[in-house]
Image (tube, helix red, strand yellow):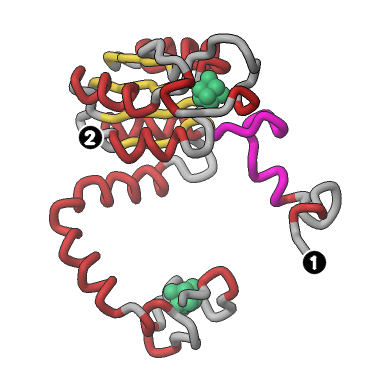
Amino acid sequence: MSHCAYCQELACSHMEPDKLPIGCPMNTCPAAYERAEGHMEKELALGAWSARIEARGYCRWTRIEEIMELARGMNWSHLGVAFCAGLKQEARVTADIFRSHGFRVSSVICKTGAVEKARLALAEEDKIRPGQPEAMCYPIAQAEVLNELGTDFNVTVGLCVGHDSLFFRYSKGPATVLVAKDRVLAHNPVGAIYCHASYYRRLTKG
Ligand code: SF4
Ligand code: SF4
């Protein structure tokens, strides 16, 4: 078990490894840290640029600016944009912004492939419009297209929960989220967490 979400001590954050609380993964999962250290050497550049961007743009750069700064730092010139059909306008603006900063951009929509939802062995009632042909979301194909085009860094715009998981699983290049899909909260999912004690009390059971 690991209880970081309930930790009061934050001994890791305060660099006090002699004060680890009960349930601390640094006590319960020591081998995980050995494996992590084994990966560090090959990830130094990405780790270092992530830290530089956090410091240099702290509370000034928006996420899309951070994405571009990271790409610049890592010398990634070809960006992939994997987007939801419902956010096509936003994907276009995203591509426009990236291009205006000199990046090469390849974008690919979730409906690419034109594969009917029957491929997923779905019941008709599990479609948005039962009884009509409906293209399935094909994040595996989105990832494979961007892999083939050789993008350096992939950015998701509004992919659904689960579809994004498939995209991340098959994307060969590093990937990040620009827009996290939330149809109710205008793609601001943390709104439900902020309001968990008021409008979204229903989220917590019991
Ligand atoms: S790693 Fe340990 S000290 Fe850090 S937040 Fe988690 S439980 Fe607390
Ligand atoms: S399945 Fe998800 S990602 Fe694909 S079009 Fe529908 S909402 Fe967008």
Residue in view at x 51 percent, y 33 percent:
62
Is 59 situated left or right of 112 in this image? right
Name the disc covering residue 96, or none. Answer: none
Please, is residue 6 above or below residue 117 in the view?
below
User: How far across and how far down the image is residue 193, in percent?
Assistant: 70, 51
In the picture as drawn, the residue positioned furthest to the right comes out as 198
Q: Which mark is residue 172?
A: 2
Q: Residues within 10 Å of mark 2 (few under 14, many from 20)?
A: some
Write the residue at 48% across / 25% down.
157
Q: Is residue 186 magenta?
A: yes
**Residue 185 sits in which quadrant?**
top right
Instruction: Evaluate whether residue 6 shows in this view.
Output: yes
Q: Position of residue 161 (x, y in %)?
A: 52, 38
Q: Earlier in the sequence, mark 2 or mark 1?
A: 2
Task: Looking at the picture, tell me which residue is in the foreground, 131 or 199.
Answer: 131
Q: Amino acid at mark 2?
A: Lys
> From the viewer's perspective, is 127 left or right of 12?
right
Instruction: Locate residue 130, reporting x and y percent.
Output: 64, 17
* Amino acid on which the number 1 mark rests in the picture: Gly
**Which residue bears the numbered disc 1?**
206
For the residue labelled by badge 1, is the local secondary structure a helix, a strand or a loop?
Answer: loop
Q: Which residues make up the magenta segment? A: 180-193
Provide the secondary structure element on which disc 2 rests: loop
Q: Position of residue 146 (x, y in %)?
A: 26, 22
Q: Is residue 46 above or below residue 138?
A: below
Report how far apart the C-alphas of labels 2 and 1 lie in the structure: 42 Å
The answer to whether residue 38 is above or below residue 200 is: below
The residue that appears at 36% across and 13% down in the rendered structure is 113
